[in-house]
């Protein structure tokens, strides 16, 4: 068990002002896997003040020196990658088959690109009689969810350090342990005091205090749309920059001339990885009516082939839901789907043979109408909706008929056709014919999926102010 009794601010581990400890539950065994302090508003105050004091010097530190710290952090993460992956498997429940590559190695790739991108801060642009300089936005608060915890933390921290910002991090209460391990690494690389500060605690208390704080210049939030709205409201009176990375209900448009089997199997796996707890999960599969029955059979076959089990077992593709609460939410949606008249063709509310752990089996609904709640609301579990469409125009219309716009995918007979369809989808991402995630590309949502961009050069821009000096 990992137990942390201190919070990290001003460059050292300090006694929290908040009373009590929060337990971290291993969702597979339901045992206590760790404990972290329940921080409070006073801890936020101390962390923000430390970040404020550090900002001047850090933002004036040469970009090459900041890049050196990013490189050192990447080296630390590589050296302790197995330990980090084990922590995330324990707190989140993502199976070992995936956890190291997806939750640790990927974020290291994302982190390393900011070694070079830090140099972008030195570029000066001349327009007419003006010189345009890039400057760090200031003190940043990061409020994060639990589903890809290190990925989300590095997606904010790496560009912030590259830009010269100082940060206060609030991890999710479900998965705080990775952030404490990262703070150990920050301490080990000797990052100047106050540049990185960590406060754990409840969102409504610690998160809102950060979003409200007048000395915080920017809040970057990843999580549900509802909490994101509250963060934006809390931040509004101080007119700070607000970057929101929110939920999704992403469509996967498969055309009649696509290789059906490859596309459908790919789509099922995309939803089931991390037990459906992926913001970009392609949970609405749009299928040509002419090939619908065939597609349903393939989807069910693929879902049944995926092994659900103990995250420590290398054969497991899916593990449990992250928490008992998340399992309740997903089970309630499965009941809603049945009440709405969708046809349950695979899975269901309970996982046979699992007495312990927050498991929900891979679940598929056929004959889903896009107006149903299970097609409009984010379920955040291993639940896939199969929706038929008559022609491609209707397929595009159904794909776009959503309050969300985070991700999307198209699989068509040719790349050109898929590209042409993908351009019509209102979403920040589109994966064409099985294209892979790219850390160099900006990531973020349209519509109620958010307003920010993370990763790549666009990710750096979130942490930059532009100053125009007229000569
Ligand atoms: P959540 O909104 O419940 O919590 C996210 C974070 O916000 C947590 O740290 C929580 O403590 C904090 N929080 C909650 N209420 C708050 C408030 N009123 N003020 C300030 N902070 C508050 O989300 P979750 O259940 O942890 O994560 C799942 C959600 O995150 C899903 O909707 C998923 O789609 C979304 N997500 C989005 C992205 C993206 O990049 N767009 C990535 C991953 C997850």
Image (cartoon, grey):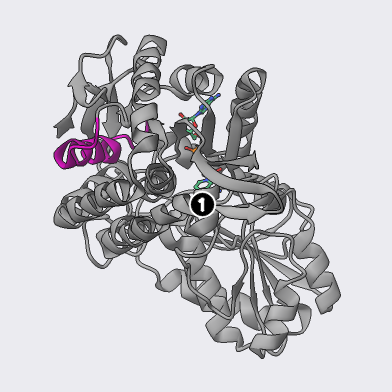
Magenta stretch containing residue 189, yes or no?
yes
Magenta stretch containing residue 203, yes or no?
no
Some atom of ligand 1 lies within 8 Å of the CB belonging to the residue at label 1: no
Q: Position of residue 329 (x, y in %)?
A: 54, 39
Snapshot quadrant of residue 242: top right
Q: Position of residue 4 (x, y in %)?
A: 19, 26
Q: What residue is rendered at 69% in x and 44% in y?
A: 448
Q: Position of residue 255 (x, y in %)?
A: 71, 82
Snapshot quadrant of residue 468: top right
Other residues around mark 1 within 10 Å, as few (<14) / some (14–19) / many (≥20)? many
Quarter of the image with the N terminus in it: top left
Q: Which residue is more in the foreground, 256 or 434?
A: 434
User: Which residue is under mark 1?
Assistant: 459
For numbered disc 1, what is the local secondary structure?
A: helix
Q: How many marks?
A: 1
Q: What residue is rendered at 58% in x and 81% in y?
A: 433
Q: Is residue 288 left or right of residue 335?
A: right
Indicate whether 108 appears above or below 330.
below
Q: Main secondary structure of the magenta part?
A: helix
**Is residue 279 something that shows in the picture?**
no
Quarter of the image with the C terminus in it: top right
Q: What residue is rendered at 69% in x and 87% in y?
A: 416
Indicate whether 241 appears above or below 10.
below
The span shown in magenta is: 173-192
**Is residue 29 something that shows in the picture?**
yes
Indicate whether 250 appears above or below 431.
above
């Amino acid at each position: 068990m990992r137990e942390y009794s201190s919070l990290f601010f001003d460059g050292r581990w300090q006694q929290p002002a908040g009373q009590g400890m929060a337990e971290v539950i291993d969702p597979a065994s339901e045992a206590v896997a760790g404990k972290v302090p329940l921080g409070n508003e006073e801890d936020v105050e101390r962390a923000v003040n430390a970040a404020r004091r550090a900002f001047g010097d850090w933002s004036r530190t040469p970009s090459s020196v900041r890049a050196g710290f990013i490189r050192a952090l990447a080296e630390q993460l590589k050296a302790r990658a197995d330990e980090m992956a084990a922590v995330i498997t324990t707190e989140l429940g993502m199976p070992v088959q995936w956890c190291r590559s997806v939750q640790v190695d990927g974020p290291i790739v994302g982190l390393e690109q900011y070694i070079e991108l830090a140099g972008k801060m030195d570029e000066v642009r001349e327009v007419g009689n003006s010189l345009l300089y890039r400057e760090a936005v200031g003190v940043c608060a990061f409020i994060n969810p639990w589903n890809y915890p290190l990925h989300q933390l590095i997606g904010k921290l790496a560009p912030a350090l590259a830009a010269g910002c100082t940060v206060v991090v609030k991890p999710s209460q479900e998965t705080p342990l990775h952030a404490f391990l990262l703070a150990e690494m920050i301490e080990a690389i000797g990052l100047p005091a106050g540049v990185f500060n960590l406060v754990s605690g409840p969102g409504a208390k610690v998160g809102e205090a950060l979003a409200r704080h007048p000395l915080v210049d920017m809040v970057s939030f990843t999580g549900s749309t509802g909490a994101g709205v509250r963060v934006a409201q809390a931040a509004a009176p101080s007119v700070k920059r607000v970057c929101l990375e929110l939920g999704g209900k992403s469509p996967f448009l498969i055309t009649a001339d696509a290789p059906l089997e490859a596309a459908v199997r790919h789509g099922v796996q995309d939803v089931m990885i991390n037990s459906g707890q992926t913001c970009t999960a392609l949970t609405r599969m749009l299928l040509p009516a002419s090939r619908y029955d065939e597609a349903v059979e393939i989807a069910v076959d693929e879902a049944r082939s995926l092994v659900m089990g103990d995250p420590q077992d290398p054969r497991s593709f899916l593990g449990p839901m992250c928490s008992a609460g998340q399992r309740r939410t997903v089970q309630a949606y499965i009941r809603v789907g049945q009440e709405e008249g969708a046809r349950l063709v695979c899975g269901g509310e309970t996982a046979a043979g699992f007495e312990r752990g927050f498991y929900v089996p891979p679940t598929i609904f056929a004959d889903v109408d896009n107006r149903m709640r299970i097609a409009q609301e984010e379920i955040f579990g291993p639940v896939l909706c199969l929706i038929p469409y008559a022609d491609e125009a209707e397929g595009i219309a159904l794909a776009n008929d959503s309050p969300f716009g985070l991700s999307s995918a198209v699989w068509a007979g040719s790349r050109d056709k898929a590209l042409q369809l993908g351009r019509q989808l209102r979403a920040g991402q589109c994966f064409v014919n099985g294209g892979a995630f790219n850390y160099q590309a900006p990531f973020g949502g349209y519509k109620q999926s958010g307003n920010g961009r993370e990763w790549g050069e666009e990710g750096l821009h979130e942490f930059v102010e532009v100053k125009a000096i007229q000569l």
